[in-house]
Each structure stands twice: as C-alpha cells, then as structure tokens.
Amino acid sequence: MKNITNSHSVRRATLVCALMVLGASVQACHPSSVAISDPSAKMAHDAYVKSINGNNVDEFMSMVTDDVVMLPPNEKAVVGKKAVREWAEEYFKAYKSHWDKTQTEFVQAGDWAFEQYAYQQLDKPVAGGADVTDIGKALLVFHHDADGKWRVARDAWNTDLAAKP
C-alpha cells in the first residue's frame, strides 16, 4: 500500500491551509491588504500574467511549481506539471489569450505567498469564430523555490458570469 503521508506533501498542504486561514482573517480586517517582505514575491504576479498573455507554453510552465494544481471553472482539477503542460498546450493551441488581472490582496509569509485577484479574460479562437470573454475572481498560491524564483503552486479561478443553460 502506498504511503500517502509523505512529510513534504503534508507540510506543504499544512502551509497552504495556514496561508488561506491567514488570508481570510487579514481580508476580513483589511480588504485591500498587502504584507510583503520580499518585493520579488509581488513581482511574480506580473511575470505570471505575462507568461499567460505570451501564449507560450514553455514560458508559462517556467512559472509553475512541479506539484502545481490548477482549478479552472467547470473542469476537473489539473494536477502536476505534466498534466498542466498538456492542459496549457491545448489551451494555447485553441486560443490567443489575454488576461487582465487586478490584485485585490497579496500576503507573503516566508516562502509562501497568496494573492486574490479579479480578472477579465479575452480568448480569440485561433481557428476563427466568436471571441470568448469572462470576468471573475481567483486565488493564487505562490512558492519561493530553491532557485530563488517565485512560482505558482495553486491557481483557482471562477467566473462571475451566470451559468449557461
């Protein structure tokens, strides 16, 4: 039987949960809070958005951790770098994408940081057809990796648009 209590995974999950609780309490007190000790952590937001808007899979993949989890709306979770690469290749092959992401909160705690943001998305189908637009909100969790770079460990976003019947 596989041992599912890998101490690194448990430690990482505990840290992510702690950051979420911290963020919820900070947000409740200060809706536009920012607590940063490493300026490069906040710059990771701009680099991540640039990688998405560049529509380049390799650039995008350089911005995520090996154990990344993406939680796109109306889809199953995309878990791990291999699965995220496949998802991103399909997405960038189908669309020329542009996202505007406005930070509403950014908090850093050691090697972890999380961000809330509001987004506007415009996807132009590569094969032609009607543009796909969306607006919504999201939560990103960043990790400061051993090489000194901040990368996205978790990305969960959801639409504010009404569900289509």
Image: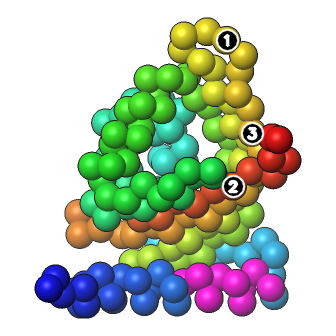
Q: Quadrant of the C terminus?
A: top right
Taking depth in this image into account, of 42 and 129 the one nearest to the observer is 129
Q: Amino acid at mark 3?
A: Asp
Q: Label 2 belongs to which residue?
A: 158
Whether the residues at callouts 1 and 2 have beta carbons within 8 Å, the answer is no
Q: Which residue reaches farthest top?
A: 128
| Number of residues whose C-alpha sits closer than 10 Å to that of mark 1, classed few (under 14), some (14–19) or many (20 or more) | few
Q: Residue at x 63, y 52 (%)?
A: 73
Q: Which sits earlier in the primary sequence, circle 1 or circle 2?
A: 1
The answer to whether residue 128 shows anywhere in this view is yes
Q: Quadrant of the N terminus?
A: bottom left
| Number of residues whose C-alpha sits closer than 10 Å to that of mark 3, classed few (under 14), some (14–19) or many (20 or more) | some
Residue 91 pos. (x, y %): 48, 32
Q: Which sits earlier in the primary sequence, circle 1 or circle 3?
A: 1
Vertically, is 148 above or below 100? Answer: below
**Which region of the structure is painted magenta?**
19-28
- Looking at the rendered structure, the number of numbered marks drawn on it comes to 3
Residue 63 pos. (x, y %): 38, 50
Residue 14 pos. (x, y %): 42, 89
Answer left or right for 48 relative to 63: right
Q: Label 3 belongs to which residue?
A: 134
Q: Label 1 belongs to which residue?
A: 129
